[in-house]
Image: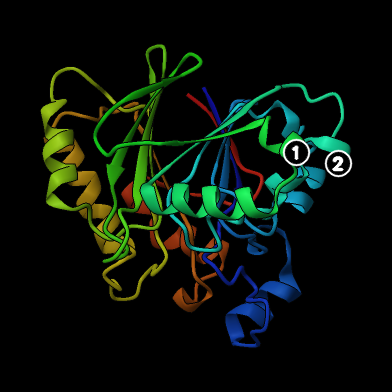
């Protein structure tokens, strides 16, 4: 199973779209791995996690055929993770010869309600024939093609059940945990129930705050270390598990090489836009 990180910043991007702080100015000057789009990841060639306003330019830069995407889990309704309007172009006169006739979205109740209301009001009938938005219940695994996907609760918003996802294909498994603080107890209990039956091949963690104090709905280095330790104690990881940190805010103040130096002793891989890993 492959994962390609298409965007590794927080909502404002890095450099921030309107920002001139020292971290953003340095990123503009240095370029390379310091330029980060809004968060999004490609699994193999047929699954995408989240959609945002960078979706079109990202697909062009990385040569991604978006019509091949068959499964699209959405974590929550914030605009850097769910922008509805690109889906309005999937069909009718806007898109011919779709590789995958029907695209399935999987999401929480808020995203599904938003999708149903706005798509029903503004989307062409011929577009809606090629789209399905499926409610995914927390802690209830579902099948999408040859994937087994389990939505787990994130700690992110009070008024919405935000998700992180466990994605399995065959014997391989990824825990994709972005836009969350330290996991809620319900998620820890579910993960602990898998003790002895699952070893995660890759764990991808929110690191919005970096070296700074946790902001409750996101994590930083300290919380990443705690999650890693908890997963190890549950026996859900082993020496071959890869740990990735991503979703960085410019407010953490550390550019890519500085982030790498800060976690060098922790075994974390610092994600950058375009990074691809195989497990």
**Residue at image point 64% right, 64% down:** 34
Picture coordinates of residue 175 (x, y %)?
36, 36
Residue 258 or 38: which is nearer the viewer?
Answer: 38
Q: Is 262 positioned to the left or the right of 219 in the image?
A: right
Picture coordinates of residue 164 (x, y %)?
35, 45
Q: Is 189 positioned to the left or the right of 208 in the image?
A: left
Residue for badge 2: 94
**Residue at image point 51% right, 16% down:** 145
- CA distance separating discs 1 and 2: 6 Å
Kindly tell me whether residue 205 is visible in this rendering. no
Q: Which mark is residue 90?
A: 1
Answer with the quarter of the image where residue 148 lies.
top left
In this rendering, the answer to whether 276 lies above or below 215 is: above
Picture coordinates of residue 176 (x, y %)?
40, 41
How crowded is the residue under tag 2: few (<14 C-alpha within 10 Å), some, or many (20+)? Answer: few
In this rendering, the answer to whether 81 lies above or below 199 is: below
Q: Which element is circle 2 on? A: helix
Q: Which element is circle 1 on? A: loop
Q: Mark 1 and mark 2 in contact? Answer it, CB < 8 Å.
A: yes
Answer with the quarter of the image where residue 215 lies.
bottom left
**Residue at image point 66% right, 45% down:** 274
Residue 84 or 141: which is nearer the viewer?
Answer: 84
């Amino acid at each position: 199973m492959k994962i390609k990180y298409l965007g590794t910043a927080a909502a404002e991007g890095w450099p921030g779209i309107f920002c001139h702080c020292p971290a953003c100015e340095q990123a503009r000057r240095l370029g390379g791995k310091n330029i980060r789009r809004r968060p999004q990841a490609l699994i193999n060639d047929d699954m995408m996690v989240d959609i945002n306003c960078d979706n079109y330019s990202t697909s062009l830069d990385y040569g991604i055929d978006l019509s091949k995407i068959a499964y699209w889990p959405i974590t929550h309704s914030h605009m850097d993770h769910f922008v509805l309007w690109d889906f309005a172009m999937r069909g009718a006169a806007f898109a011919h010869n779709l590789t995958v006739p029907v695209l399935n979205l999987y999401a929480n109740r808020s995203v599904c309600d938003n999708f149903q209301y706005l798509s029903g009001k503004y989307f062409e009938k011929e577009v809606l024939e090629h789209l399905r938005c499926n409610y995914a219940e927390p802690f209830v695994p579902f099948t999408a093609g040859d994937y087994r996907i389990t939505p787990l609760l994130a700690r992110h918003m009070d008024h919405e059940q935000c998700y992180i996802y466990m994605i399995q294909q065959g014997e391989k498994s990824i825990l994709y945990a972005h836009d969350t603080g330290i996991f809620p107890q319900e998620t820890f209990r579910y993960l602990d129930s898998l003790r002895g039956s699952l070893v995660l091949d890759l764990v991808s963690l929110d690191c919005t705050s970096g070296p700074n104090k946790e902001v409750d709905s996101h994590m930083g280095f300290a919380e990443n270390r705690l999650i890693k330790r908890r997963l190890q104690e549950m026996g859900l990881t082993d020496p071959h598990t890869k740990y990735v940190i991503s979703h960085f805010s410019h407010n953490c103040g550390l550019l890519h090489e500085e982030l790498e130096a800060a976690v060098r002793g922790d075994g974390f891989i610092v994600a950058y836009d375009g990074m691809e890993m195989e497990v």
